[in-house]
Image (cartoon, rainbow, N blue to C red):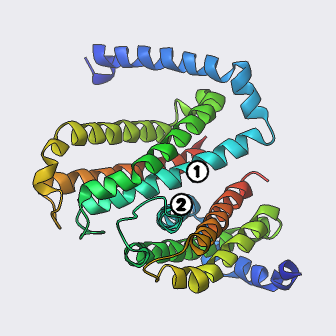
Amino acid sequence: MSFSDSAYMRLYDAIDSYLLEKCITLSNTPVGTYIRESTWEFPVIEGIHVLSIAMSVGMILWFDLRLLGVNMRPRPISEIFRNIYWWMVGGFLAAILSGFLLFWAEADRAFPNIFARLKFIGLLLAGLNILYFHLGTQRHQSDWDNDVSPPFRVRAAGFLSITLWVVVVAAGRLMAYTF
Amino acid sequence: MIRESLGPLFDWLSQSSIGTAVADSRYAFAVIEVFHLFGIILLLGSASLMALRLAGLTMREQKVSEVGRQLGWYTFAGLMTMIVTGVLMVASIPNKYYNSGPFWWKMGFFWAGVVFHFTIYRKVTGFDRVGWLLGGFTALAVVVLWYGTGAFGRAIGFF
């Protein structure tokens, strides 16, 4: 039995077609059609999406670079985090909301797209990286908060974060070329 | 008037080997645009944080000059990345950009931003302390000029 005939692949195909069907339904709702066919709304939402990504990813970059011990080294890590937190969260909320509206309008074309999938996987992994950092690594923050060059696991979280956001941004931009 | 006088530059770009090389390649433009976006993120990310500090909304534990020193290199790197990738993008399809309204708005905001960056912004971010009026004005100018550049840049693809 080949891999493509395996139970896993059949299950994958079933889930894939089920989700594609839901995405087609979503993009054909009145709201999805309205955004897609609009003259101004779609470009404005996309503009907000790009600028809010620049704001949020641009903000998290300073925290990641501090985790790596590259930038703002004389300052405690907690201080950098406190200072960027709400601006970063605000940017992310705007990016997620505008991204959801864009997906709503083009879900049928975005769902099967390889770069869209790469973007979603990147987002998921970036989220897991943040979760692991907060629930695990950050519990001992007092041990390394003032370190000019923090321990390996802290630097690794910063490096992984930057890498994943690069993937998310690049895949998001490349989606437009492959629709 | 500026548009017409720059016409020969666009003609020359359309004939240049680098422009035709990007235009002929299947992936070059897309990859260059991804790096253009990285440049915008570096520029907007660093300028936004600096603007927030100038407005007294964040990083008040640090002197303005200290934040400026830490972020200045990234702003400069973002600017240079945008210029190099931007020239390559324009060189590949000069006619499209020459005839695009948002492109000329973007250029207006961008070059105003560059002039502002190397004059007032550089001076103000070198001060240890900045009053609310000068800080607020500089922060507002940074946001309007760079976010305006980004917004009109995005509009090129649509209008």
The reply to whether dot 2 and dot 1 touch (C-beta < 8 Å) is yes
| Residue at image coords 71%, 45% | A44
Q: Nearer the viewer, residue A89 or A104?
A: A89
Q: Are marks 2 and 1 on the same chain?
A: no
- Find residue B154 and report its horizontal and vertical position in percent: 67, 55
Give the residue type at disc 1: Val
> Circle 2 sits in a helix, a strand or a loop, which is it?
helix
Q: Nearer the viewer, residue A38 or A95?
A: A95
Q: Is residue A178 left or right of residue B149?
A: left
Q: Nearer the viewer, residue A72 or A161?
A: A72
Mark 2 lies on residue: B37
- Find residue A40 and report its horizontal and vertical position in percent: 79, 42
| Residue at image coords 23%, 50% | A157
- Find residue B25 and report its horizontal and vertical position in percent: 57, 64
Q: Is residue A166 left or right of residue A18?
A: left
- The chain holding disc 2 is B
| Residue at image coords 58%, 53% | A51
Q: Few, some or many C-alpha atoms within 10 Å of disc 2 (few <14, some 14-19, many ≥20)?
A: many
Mark 1 lies on residue: A50
User: Height in image: A32 above or below A68?
Assistant: above
| Residue at image coords 47%, 63% | B49
Q: Nearer the viewer, residue A83 or A151?
A: A83
Q: Is residue A6 visible?
A: no
